[in-house]
């Protein structure tokens, strides 16, 4: 379940952001979660929630990933996976609430501190990375209701395609590593 922490953290942040845009249906590789349909079917966001979503979406789209994003994030991701940290419960939370909840996780604090990263940097980095890579993979579907992506982030991901794929893989593409073998299908 270690990769689920990463997927869930990304999904929790992205869930808030994606409600208004319909990104959830187009992001299975990055944010698979069974409550995708039920979340959007059960409750329509209020105008205040829509405004918060739009604000969070703009914040994430504009956030600039540091040039050393991959060098800094990969060790954090690997340590989270190895520690088997369970994700915080952050459904329907704003980006700021998600950052606070993540920062309050006692098991995560030493990993972030050891790697010189704040909860804000972690959540913003993972969310921005996920959103940017999703829109880059599905530009026609994902960019309709999106504010423009930070062009520096697009260039960063384009110029580090192998690292982008490795991070996506580490976040959920290779759950079997270090775990019990899955039953054959």
Image (tube, rainbow, N blue to C red):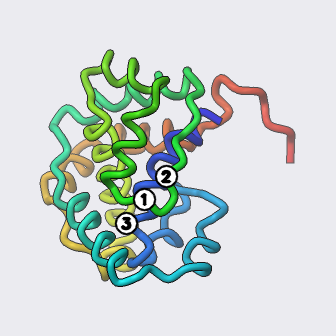
In terms of depth relative to the viewer, which is nearer, 3 or 39?
39
Identify the secondary structure beneath mark 3: helix
| Residue at the spot 48% in from the left edge and 55% down from the top edge | 11
Residues packed near mark 3 inside 10 Å, few (<14), some (14 to 19) or many (20 plus):
many
Say whether residue 39 is left or right of residue 66.
right
Rendered position, 27 above or below 48: above
Rendered position, 8 above or below 48: above
For label 3, the residue is: 17
Mark 3 and mark 1: Cα distance apart in space:
10 Å
Of circles 2 and 3, the one toward us is 2
Image marks 2 and 3: residues in contact by CB distance under 8 Å: no
Specify the quadrant of the image occupied by residue 19.
bottom left
**Residue 121 percent location from the top left of the image:** 26, 38
For label 1, the residue is: 93
| Residue at the spot 34% in from the left edge and 84% down from the top edge | 47
| Residue at the spot 86% in from the left edge and 42% down from the top edge | 184
Circle on res. 170: none
Image marks 1 and 2: residues in contact by CB distance under 8 Å: yes
Of circles 3 and 1, the one toward us is 1
Mark 1 and mark 2: Cα distance apart in space:
6 Å
For label 2, the residue is: 90
In terms of depth relative to the viewer, which is nearer, 81 or 108?
108
Mark 2 and mark 3: Cα distance apart in space:
12 Å
Say whether residue 38 is left or right of residue 168.
right
| Residue at the spot 31% in from the left edge and 20% down from the top edge | 113
Residues packed near mark 1 inside 10 Å, few (<14), some (14 to 19) or many (20 plus):
some
Pick out the residue farthest to the right: 184
Say whether residue 71 is left or right of residue 10.
left
């Amino acid at each position: 379940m270690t990769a689920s922490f990463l997927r869930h953290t990304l999904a929790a942040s992205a869930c808030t952001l994606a409600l208004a845009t319909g990104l959830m249906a187009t992001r299975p590789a990055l944010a698979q979660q069974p409550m995708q349909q039920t979340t959007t079917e059960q409750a329509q966001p209020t105008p205040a929630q829509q405004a918060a979503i739009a604000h969070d979406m703009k914040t994430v789209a504009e956030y600039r990933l540091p040039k050393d994003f991959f060098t800094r994030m990969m060790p954090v991701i690997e340590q989270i996976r190895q520690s088997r940290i369970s994700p915080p419960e952050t459904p329907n939370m704003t980006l700021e609430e998600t950052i606070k909840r993540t920062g309050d996780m006692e098991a995560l604090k030493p990993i972030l501190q050891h790697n010189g990263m704040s909860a804000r940097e972690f959540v913003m980095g993972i969310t921005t990375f996920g959103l940017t890579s999703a829109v880059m993979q599905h530009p026609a579907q994902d960019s309709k209701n999106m504010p423009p992506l930070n062009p520096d982030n697009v260039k960063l991901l384009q110029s580090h395609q192998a690292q982008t794929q490795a991070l996506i893989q580490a976040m959920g593409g290779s759950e079997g590593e270090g775990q019990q073998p899955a039953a054959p299908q």
